[in-house]
Image (spheres, rainbow, N blue to C red):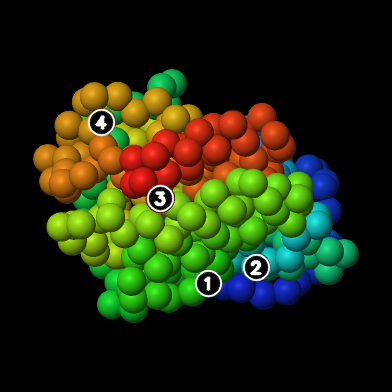
Amino acid sequence: MVAHLGVISFSSSCHLLHSSHRLVHNKPIVMATVSMDPVKEWILTEGKATQITGISPVGGGCINLASRYNTDAGTFFVKTNRSIGPEMFEGEALGLSAMYETNSIRVPKPFKVGALPTGGSYIIMEFIEFGSSRGDQAILGRKLAEMHKATKSEKGFGFHVNNTIGSTPQINTWTSDWIEFYSEHRLTFQLKLAQQQFGDSAIYEKGQRLVKNIGALFEGVTIEPCLLHGDLWSGNISSDKNGDPVILDPACYYGHNEAEFGMSWCAGFGGSFYKAYFEVMPQQPGFEKRRDLYLLYHYLNHYNLFGSGYRSSAMSIIDDYLRMLKA
């Protein structure tokens, strides 16, 4: 965990080296070394460290490389990607900052995003030492609801930048109407991608029929744009050493709070989670009828990312809604 706070800055810098040797004593040599390494350069200047004592890999990710940097000023968590520019990490940093500023659920504080001159990018953030479990489900539910309640958007539904859901682009153009936003920038985007990638006209055509009829699922519902993590599955949920929940790797945007449960099929939320959540954010009429609509976005994304194994789940949801809505 990093004791001090930093400020996010977005910039290009120099080549990242994977050296783990200790930087010591000879200041001219140190400066010559760090000038070729934007991560170390930030840590040894704005990060307030004078010495990096160790660098070790951190497992768990499938898109980026992750490392732990131990220093005399604390520990930093660094992710790098050799093939994607800074835009992906800029979106992540803006999302983490927005969640951090709600003072509700714990998230790692981002410090810096930059480009690697040989291609790719990096992000430096607070290192959080995880506890031995995912923490208490009731506390997770309550704190997540507090985050949703804490921040609303006057611009409507969307986010300041486009970001990614996994490695799929996620379009966050500000939209005043939730049904329009979810239809166009979530469901239709994924349906078009499936048609383009797999020539799947059947799922596209049925999906479009559903999109045109989802308004009936929202009758009598007041929808406020809440700040969402956006990709809340078990791999992005942990707890710190005190047992308090931690969420990470977001795909943030402002949306209907119920959309946060779209990855619940892969998150393990139990009864205590939902009970605590709805004590803070009361359940709205028709919640059960809308649950699968929010699962659909993520099943479609998994279909587009990982292939046909997820197609049947997505198609089953579409078919069920078409029957329910008589569309």
Amino acid on which the number 4 mark rests in the picture: Phe
Of pointers 2 and 3, the one earlier in the residue sequence:
2
Q: Say if mark 2 contacts mark 4, CB within 8 Å.
A: no
Percent across and percent down for residue 94 are 48, 65
Amino acid on which the number 3 mark rests in the picture: Ala
Amino acid on which the number 2 mark rests in the picture: Glu
Gap between marks 2 and 4 measured at Cα: 33 Å
Of pointers 1 and 2, the one earlier in the residue sequence:
2
Location of residue 176 (image quadrant):
bottom left
Location of residue 134 with respect to 192 vertically, above or below: above
| Circle 1: element type | loop
- Per the image, the residue denoted by label 4 is 273
- Per the image, the residue denoted by label 2 is 87
Of pointers 3 and 4, the one earlier in the residue sequence:
4
Location of residue 139 with respect to 199 vertically, above or below: above
Q: Say if mark 1 contacts mark 2, CB within 8 Å.
A: yes
